[in-house]
Image (tube, rainbow, N blue to C red):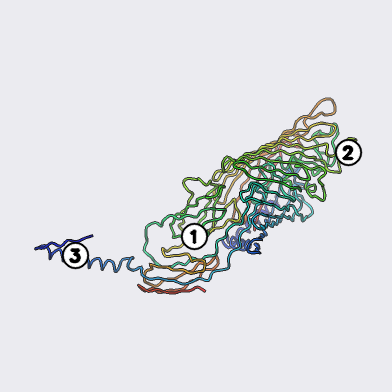
Amino acid sequence: MKTFRIVVSIALMACAIPRAGAEDFLDRVDQALTFSAFNDNVRGRLSGTLDLEGYYFQQPAPGLILSKSDAIFNPRLSLFFDSQLGPHVYFFVQSRFDRGFDPRDEGAQIRLDEYALRLTPWDDGRFTLQAGKFATVVGNWVPRHLSWENPFVNAPLPYENVTPLEDKRAPYYGYFTGVLRAAKYEYIPVIWGPVYATGISVAGRIGQFDYAAEVKNASLSSRPESWNATETGFDNPTVSARIGFRPNQMWNFGFSASDGAYFRPEAMATLPNGSDIGDYHQRVLGQDISFAWHHLQLWAEFYEARFEVPGIGDADTFAWYLEGKYKFTPQFFGAVRWNQQFFADVPDGFGGSAPWGHDLWRADIAAGYRFTSHTQLKIQYSLQHEKNGPRDFGHALYAQFTVRF
Amino acid sequence: MAFRFKVGEDSGRDFMRVRSLFVSLCIFGAFSPVALAQAVIEGRVELPKSHLAPVVNKRYEIVTKGGVLATSPPLAVVYLEGSFPKTAAPATKQVAQKDLTFVPALLPVRVGTRVEFPNEDDTYHNIFSYSPAKRFDLGRYRPDEKPVPSQVFDVAGLVTLRCDIHEHMRGLILVVDTPHFVTTDVDGHFRLSGLPAGRYTLKAWVDSRTTRERPVELKSGSTLHVDFP
């Protein structure tokens, strides 16, 4: 709770600075970090966010928070470089300095999370080609996954709730008893956050339809280390795609699909003789919908995921969420989210069958306040119920203060 | 209007009426704002260097259009501060969102002016301001939104317009408490005409940190030259 109070106190102190002056200063910083050359044909902009996050929760830690204590402080500096080279070439980089891609209570890292080169040959956006290490085209959460855009502190359930399946070791009969035997970080969710895997994508819009497809080196469920091309090659690529339909600016419907091997090379020794990593795929079907009108925004996503598990068969899971955000005043907003995940039965090794994971639901409620157009404070409470889990209900409190420059 | 002079006993009385009317018009005209508004101020404001073209953040837009955004050259607003008679509500002005920019990028308005924000792009915009002079958020709205979202700017000051969806978009509305203001041309030249005689302060707003001013004394029929180096 002390960590939580520290974040809120820092936020309030920072906001005691005169708003107009702070806003003007950060606007000038923004201008000072913009570069131009060759008659404006080459332009670059350095920007970033500083996030100070505090988490207070009951063990086991929720989602992809990796901590044995009940509270952690997670500062994060994200730096972005966006560059426009003439009218048709765009390049961007995202680098982070934090305590790990997923919040943890030890260590510090500097990472190059994203880098990509995008070619847009036609001005009307009918086709773009992008290569590099970048977020997945699947679903509709990616455009709001960064702290400034996300109404919540954490991600929706499908993006952070680990299943009882590991990617470094194949399971065996009787494995899915619902008890996580290894450290949480050994397990994989349906989609691991924004999945900054490496590869190429094509995308475009034709009338009311838009399309995007990508070939990446790692599956949607893959862990952050797997996203680097130096760590995981393209021997077993994952192919993902999304088709979107936008009848007007208010509505957006999308259908996604993904197929690719999900085991890491370390799992090879545990696979049945004669089989290969590429024989076991994660297949995902996704449907997403979003709506926006004046001060109201709604999003929903539905994911049906199937993991091909050696010696066991198909392990299916269904996860979904509905999220809403409303701006009560120009600076104050609130958000609610309902998340659920269900697990299908798999053979239990004794002639019967049992669910391969614990069904659960989670309710998230958050409030945010933008002190200026560069500073924001969010507070979130989550209540999670897991059937047959370590405990029926889990509570978590989050605070996040963001400075955007 | 035509006056017809009758021949006869009434003609002298009519002549007197016309003469009285003419004299009244002259007296009224001499003190009316129209007649008082004779002075002119012209000059030049030294403008800052051109803004750099913004770089649009396209990281998580699956579909993006090509192109380089147009930039508006820096301009200044010159206005005369003083005590002026109240006039009718100012006419409604517009700041459009077109090609992901505000057009015009700088709009001076008088206190009490209603400004409309038509969306001329084929995507949502969400105009907002956290400026002390006007705090508002129009929410997300479409190009065909009716009525066109608008705000009344009733406090003098600088209002910075932003879009919650397109981070690079910036626009300015300078709300002034005077009917006498003008935007310079791209070379900094300005001309304020129809000004009443008297002592005033002439101000040149250059950017959020720079407003230059000069006391001026205007005489009817005169043209004053003022430069803001």
Chain that bears disc 3: B
Parent chain of label 2: A
In front: label 2 or label 1: 1
B223 left or right, relative to A401: left
Instruction: Indicate the amino acid at tag 3.
Output: Val
In the picture of the structure, the residue carrying the numbered disc 3 is: B18
The disc placed on residue A270 is 2
Label 1 and label 3: CA atoms lie apart by 47 Å
Q: Which mark is residue B199?
A: none
Q: Residue furthest front?
A: A122
Q: Is residue A179 left or right of residue B201?
A: right
Distance in Å between CA atoms under marks 3 and 2: 114 Å
Quarter-of-image position of residue A259: top right
Task: Measure the C-alpha gap from mark 2 to mark 1.
Answer: 69 Å
Could you tell me which secondary element the residue under label 3 belongs to?
helix
Image-based side of A198 in relation to A206, left or right: right
Question: In the picture, which quadrant includes the C terminus of chain A?
Answer: bottom right
Q: Residue at x 13, y 64 (%)?
A: B13
Amino acid residing under circle 2? Thr
Is label 1 on the same chain as label 3?
A: yes
Amino acid type indicated by mark 1 = Leu
Which residue is at the front of the view, B224 or A243? A243
**Label 3 crowd (10 A; few <14 / some 14-19 / many >=20):** few
Check disc 1 and report the residue beneath it.
Answer: B107
